[in-house]
Image (cartoon, helix red, strand yellow):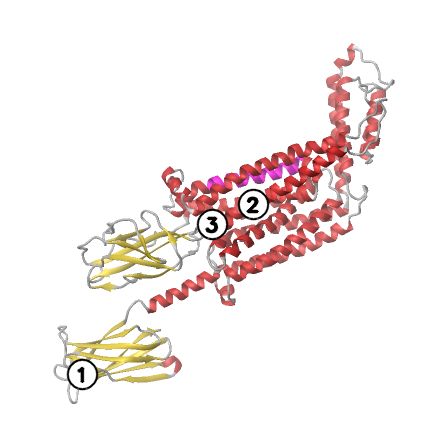
Amino acid sequence: MGALLLLFLAVAGALLAGAAPVSAHAALTGSDPAQGAVVDKAPAQVSLTFSEKVALSDGSVRVLDPSGKRVDTGKASNLSGATYGVKLHSGLPDGTFTVSYQVVSADSHPVAGAFTFSIGAPSTTSVSLSDQTAGGGVVGGLYGFGRYVSYAGFILMVGGGAFVLACWQRGAAVRAVQRLVVSGWVALTSATLALLLLRGSYTGSGKVGDIFDLTLLGQVLQTKAGAALVSRLLLLAAAALFIAVLFGAYVKRDAENADADGEGADGETEKRGPDADLAAEKKDLTFGLAIGGTVVAAGLAASWAMAEHASTGIQAGLAMPVDVLHLLAVALWLGGLTTLLVALYRAPSIEAAAVRRFSRVAFASVVALTVTGLYQSWRQVGSWSALTDTTYGQLLLVKVGLVAVLVGIAWISRRWTAQIPETPEAVDTAETAATAEAAVTAVTAEAADTTDSAETADAEEKQRAEVAAGASPVAGASSMAAASPGSDTPDAPDKGPEDAEDSPRAAQLARQRAAVATARQKRIRDADPLRSGLRRSVLAEAGVAVVLLAVTTALTSTEPGRTEEAAKAATASASQRSGPLSLTIPFDTGGQDGKGSARLTLDPARVGGNEMHVFVTRPNGKAFDVPEVKVAFTLDAKDIGPLPVVPDRIATGHWTASGVQIPMAGDWKITVTVRTSDIDQATVNKNAKIG
């Protein structure tokens, strides 16, 4: 358990120390003006196009002049689809302007970035682009850690409760199991409150001081992610009621069933079966807890599905319930596994039947995980290239490997489980544990009321021996009845005034004997090789599960491979449509008045038909009337070309050609030949990417 705790802290520390801006889930695919563009006059507005719809707030898009002063008129608005624009003030000077944006993608993750464009000509600027990050820093690290703790709390609470209800109902009375499930509830509730407070700063400024800004909190409550967190808190209130019933009234029903075996009217022990009414009441309570617990657990899982990856992209209507099933299967498997580990280490005993029942539940959970995981992988990745070339795909491969290791260790655990017989000698039964606890309690009470007589000591020693030997509940109760002076037997010794003086000493002696008996019982329990083997394999499973949970948390904050590839394709396509290719090539024919430059434009500069213009100017910028201009395109990498193009003269210094075919994308060499007289001409070339 100590090693497992150290592993959890190490993983949590790695998550916190490695805090970095999260991967963008909505990519900027285009803008007007385009990134790096130089425009002749100031635009009336700046527009940005993303790969999916995003959420905007005040200051989501800002346009800054070279001195860092804002020149936009206010909040950005949705122009059409996933395109958003912000208007600019009139009369802007020439120079380089910076466009900074920070938005929230449809799956609740922040996206930030910046680019520049220039009016008239580029200039120096005082605005730094390196500060445009989202989801990073201390706040980003805390938010990531909170997500990890929330997943862990959900798994412990749901998986632990399901383990008790479906596999080991007597475990509801075990203090260690109660603490585990309650700790899961506390962790999930605390993490949810922390995420709600951190959300505004996480998607905004990233400043620690903004965590407790009530204005930001009000804005968060109006978002999809904020609604999901509030819904989770409301469901956690219902979960608290479920836990109270499970570990309160449910345990009480077990005690009432046990009390149904009472004493007859003649004072002798009478063995009776459980009361029919109490048994029926417990059955109804179990059914109600199962239904209520399932509804609450599914609702909690849906609070993740409704605000993250499953809620966006293709087949969102199917992906959300599949994601809920996936989370529930994870909780049943890993949460039940952790509860079993605690029972093996901390509980006095656990029945072999309970271990076998959990083995069947775990197998069904793994099947559900496999089916839902395959669907999620196809939906989020979509292609082999996305599986190997994107961060999401690589993390998914790591997760699959960890699951395979976990299943392998689980197979070893199942082998240990199959070897455990249903006998008290091989596995400590719950009856033996109950007898031991009742015996220790009775001895303590007896020691407080009796003298340290030889008869009492003999009775106590006899009773301790029966407990250590694994006596049955009936035998233990009979022994206690014979030894207890408070019973109705005629052998109870009379208590004198001097007995009260020895009570503290007798109580201390009883506690010492109880500690010795407990230690002896623990040595006998730990000496069982089957129990030890199962305990080691389950501990190994839990260790792998801690790392698996960290990888899963990282996946939820990483851009899915399918959308990453789609964003890259959209960005490439947008860059092709961003404007014509423009090249300025100086030339010198060597003759008199033979110097000048040729500016060639190719629109839209992509594979297929293009429109070409060539403007020939003198060194002073005036149009140069030359008798002939020829152009050729060569793609050396594919041995294509030269492809000659002879443009038509339409005005002084202006030549054009339409339908210029570019057969393939690549780094083309563009050769321009300019003839300034009958004998003077020059051929110049320049490389440019087309397509």
Comes first in the chain, label 2 or label 3: 2
2 shown above or below 496: below
What's the mark number on residue 221? Answer: none
What's the mark number on residue 307? Answer: 3
Q: Residue at x 50, y 62 (%)?
A: 381
- In the picture of the structure, the residue carrying the numbered disc 1 is 589
Q: Nearer the viewer, mark 2 or mark 3?
A: 3
- Asked if the stretch drawn in magenta spans residue 493, the answer is no
Q: Residue at x 73, y 30 (%)?
A: 256
Q: Quadrant of residue 164?
A: top right
Comes first in the chain, label 3 or label 1: 3
Q: Nearer the viewer, mark 3 or mark 1?
A: 3
Decide which of 184, 635 is in the foreground and name it: 184
- Asked if the stretch drawn in magenta spans residue 177, the answer is yes
Q: Which residues are magenta?
A: 174-194
Which amino acid is tagged 3?
Answer: Ala
Q: Residue at x 37, y 75 (%)?
A: 665
Image location (x, y in percent) of residue 570: 39, 65
Q: Secondary structure at mark 3?
A: loop
